[in-house]
Image (cartoon, rainbow, N blue to C red):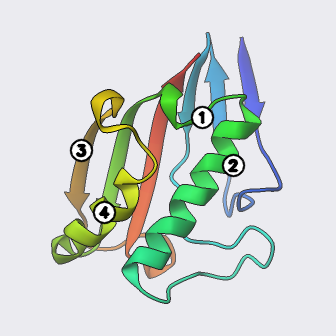
Amino acid sequence: MKKIINTPHAPAPIGPYNQAILINNVLYTSGQIALNPITMELVLDDIKTETKQVMENMKAVLKAADMTFENVFKTSIFISDMHNFAEINEVYATYFNETTAPARETVEVANLPKFVNVEISMMASK
């Protein structure tokens, strides 16, 4: 059975989608960008701050599904400039235990929603 996951502690969807869907104890998240969930303003001070906001948004979505980053088994990272990879990875790494970190791909793309620099989506299971 499909369960919709939405929380006010992460940015409200800006299109026809939900923050996440839980099916058979597997959570599929939509991509998160660096929107402040309270103001819905972008947090683009620098790439590390932007990445931290993305991860905090994802943390809120996971929490709404009664999960943590330990439940994550797959992530997808989309970035607008591969030169930012090291700084994005530095922040991203603080949210995971290296020995149990999820599988991941990182892809450079031409543009992202609202022309942000990073978007991350995840899959997690209970």
Horizontal side of residue 93 vs 68, given as left or right? left
Q: Which residue is mark 1?
A: 68
Are the residues flagged by discs 3 and 4 in contact, CB closer than 8 Å?
A: no
Which sits earlier in the primary sequence, circle 3 or circle 2?
Answer: 2
User: Is residue 97 something that shows in the picture?
Assistant: yes
Are the residues flagged by discs 3 and 1 in contact, CB closer than 8 Å?
A: no
Q: Which residue is mark 4?
A: 90
Residue 84 image offset from top left, x and y in percent? 24, 75
Residue 121 image offset from top left, x and y in percent? 46, 46
C-alpha distance separating marks 3 and 4: 15 Å
Q: Which residue is mark 2?
A: 60
Amino acid carrying label 1: it is Thr
Amino acid carrying label 3: it is Glu
Q: Secondary structure at mark 2?
A: helix
Which sits earlier in the primary sequence, circle 4 or circle 1?
Answer: 1
Q: Which residue is mark 3?
A: 105
